[in-house]
């Protein structure tokens, strides 16, 4: 029967080009190069449980399959997105039969292992320990947070990296050759850029572009150039997993750029996240935190400007309101820095958590009733406004028996330099008052 009526769909290019040997793998030289961990593991001939952690499209599934081939093991693959307890039990039973009937080991590969809950992940433990199968998990999320510690302790974690531009160009060139289509260097470079470190995305683009090239060139002389790539490929969203590892990595980069007083780097990360679809409201909330944590009283305007920017965004929305947020990001980066308030708050909270619930001293209690006055509420309180400079020197506002603490230590930067001078002056007034009182 003619292939025209075949019900079997053609395999995607990415599947057709999946490496058959380690030498065909593109990228991950830090793991597969001579003397590197996976190269040594493959030569040893003895498999061990492992977890591949890395972004999408960098070869996690491919490496698991190559491991099974190298160790002459049965390969069972399940996806935590689709599988449940039933599939786990079926995989365990299949591994048992394979070992009992054929004496052949099994590699059980679990894609997106972080999607399994704790009990599902625990189901693998006894079989990993008994040696029934070698466990290989793949995840795009940080295993430290998403994989049970018990399972994590039994598996070696290997970190896979995004494919570089040259690796992606090599992969794209290989894909066009498989499609029987030529491509110039400018086209390959653009595809690498659009793929954003993801090899599967690169090959999917190649497949779409090659199809378009063949439609345009019916004489078989199809050639892919930059205009064709731009015409076919929709603008590719940059890698950004909301709430996932990459999300928090970029938030961290934005925060540290602000703290490090680099306005251009801060603006870069802000725009990267906006470009990838981050919620500007979330970014504005994080910026408000930065204003309090890393700037504080060194420049109180930072908090005011950031709050105003958040309000502007609420009024204007996207994209107009994003400009106000960008203005705030730059101001935060160039503002004088101080974490004195942040450190003082943390120290005070820790002290309170460990201390007793001390009563308020009588002299600073309010006395709105006659009974309270008779109980000496507010007795001997010194009203600051009635004293020189509006300050009551050496007045005690701490609970009885508690030594005054010094949590807030202003820096010499920005407004805090003035605050430090003010506090030093008040301490001098305290010392002078105590000295005069002692002489009486």
Image: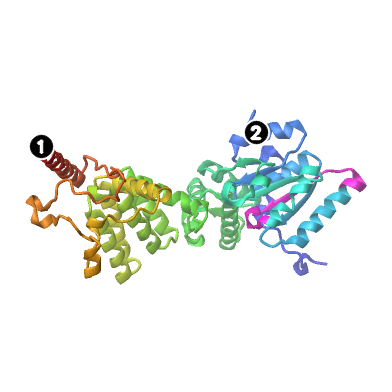
Identify the image quadrant of residue 377: bottom left
In the image, 249 versus 222, the foreground residue is 249
Classed neighbour count for the residue bearing mark 2: other residues with Cα under 10 Å, few (<14), some (14–19), many (≥20):
few
Classed neighbour count for the residue bearing mark 1: other residues with Cα under 10 Å, few (<14), some (14–19), many (≥20):
few
Indicate the position of residue 164 as horizontal and vertical percent values.
52, 43
Tell me which numbered mark, 2 or 1, is placed earlier along the sequence: 2
> Where, quadrant-wise, is the N terminus in this rendering?
bottom right
Residue in the picture at 46% in, 49% down: 249
Residue in the picture at 38% in, 47% down: 351
Question: In front: mark 2 or mark 1?
Answer: 1
Mark drawn on residue 439? 1
Residue matched to label 2: 37
Horizontally, residue 46 falls left or right of residue 169, namely right
Residue 435 in the image: above or below residue 220 = above
Question: The magenta stretch spans which residues?
Answer: 99-118
Identify the image quadrant of residue 274: bottom left
In the image, 180 versus 379, the foreground residue is 379
Please say whether residue 421 is one of the residues in the magenta stretch. Answer: no
Identify the secondary structure beneath mark 1. Answer: helix
Identify the secondary structure beneath mark 2. Answer: helix
Residue 243 in the image: above or below residue 414 = below
Residue in the picture at 59% in, 40% down: 27
Indicate the position of residue 108 as horizontal and vertical percent values.
75, 49
- How many numbered dots are placed on residues in this image? 2
């Amino acid at each position: 029967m003619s292939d025209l009526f075949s019900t079997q769909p053609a395999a995607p290019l990415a599947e057709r080009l999946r490496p058959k040997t380690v030498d065909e793998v593109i990228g991950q030289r830090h793991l597969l190069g001579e003397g590197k961990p996976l190269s040594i593991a493959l030569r040893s001939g003895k498999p061990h449980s492992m977890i591949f952690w890395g972004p999408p499209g960098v070869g996690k599934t491919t490496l698991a399959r190559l491991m099974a081939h190298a160790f002459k093991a049965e390969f069972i693959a399940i996806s935590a997105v689709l599988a449940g307890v039933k599939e786990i039990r079926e995989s365990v039973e299949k591994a048992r039969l394979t070992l009992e009937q054929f004496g052949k080991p099994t590699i059980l590969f679990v894609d997106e292992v972080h999607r399994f809950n704790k009990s599902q992940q625990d189901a693998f433990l006894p079989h990993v320990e008994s040696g029934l199968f070698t466990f290989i998990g793949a995840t795009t999320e940080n295993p430290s947070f998403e994989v049970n510690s018990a399972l994590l302790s039994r598996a070696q974690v290997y970190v896979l990296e995004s494919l570089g531009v040259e690796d992606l160009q090599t992969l794209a060139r290989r894909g066009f050759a498989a499609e029987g289509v030529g491509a110039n260097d400018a086209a390959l470079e653009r595809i690498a850029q659009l793929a954003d470190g993801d090899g599967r995305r690169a090959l999917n683009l190649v497949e779409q572009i090659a199809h378009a090239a063949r439609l345009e060139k019916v004489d078989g002389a199809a050639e892919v150039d930059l205009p064709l790539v731009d015409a076919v490929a929709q603008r590719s969203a940059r890698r950004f997993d909301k709430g996932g590892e990459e999300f928090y990595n970029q938030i961290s980069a934005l925060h540290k750029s602000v703290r490090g007083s680099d306005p251009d780097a801060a603006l870069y990360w802000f725009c990267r996240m906006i470009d990838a679809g981050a919620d500007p409201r979330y970014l504005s909330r994080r910026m408000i935190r930065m204003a309090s944590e890393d700037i504080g009283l060194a420049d109180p305007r930072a908090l005011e400007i950031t709050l105003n920017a958040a309000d502007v965004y609420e009024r204007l929305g996207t994209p107009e309101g994003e400009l106000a947020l960008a203005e705030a990001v730059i101001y935060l980066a160039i503002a004088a820095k101080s974490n004195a308030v942040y450190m003082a708050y943390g120290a005070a909270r820790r002290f309170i958590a460990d201390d007793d619930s001390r009563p308020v001293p009588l002299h600073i209690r309010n006395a709105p009733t006659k009974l309270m006055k008779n109980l000496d509420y507010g007795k001997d309180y010194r009203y600051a406004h009635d004293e020189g400079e509006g300050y009551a020197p050496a007045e005690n506002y701490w609970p009885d028996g508690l030594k005054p603490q010094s949590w807030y230590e202003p820096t010499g930067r920005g407004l805090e330099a003035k605050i430090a001078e003010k506090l030093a002056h008040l301490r001098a007034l305290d010392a002078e008052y105590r000295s005069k009182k002692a002489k009486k």
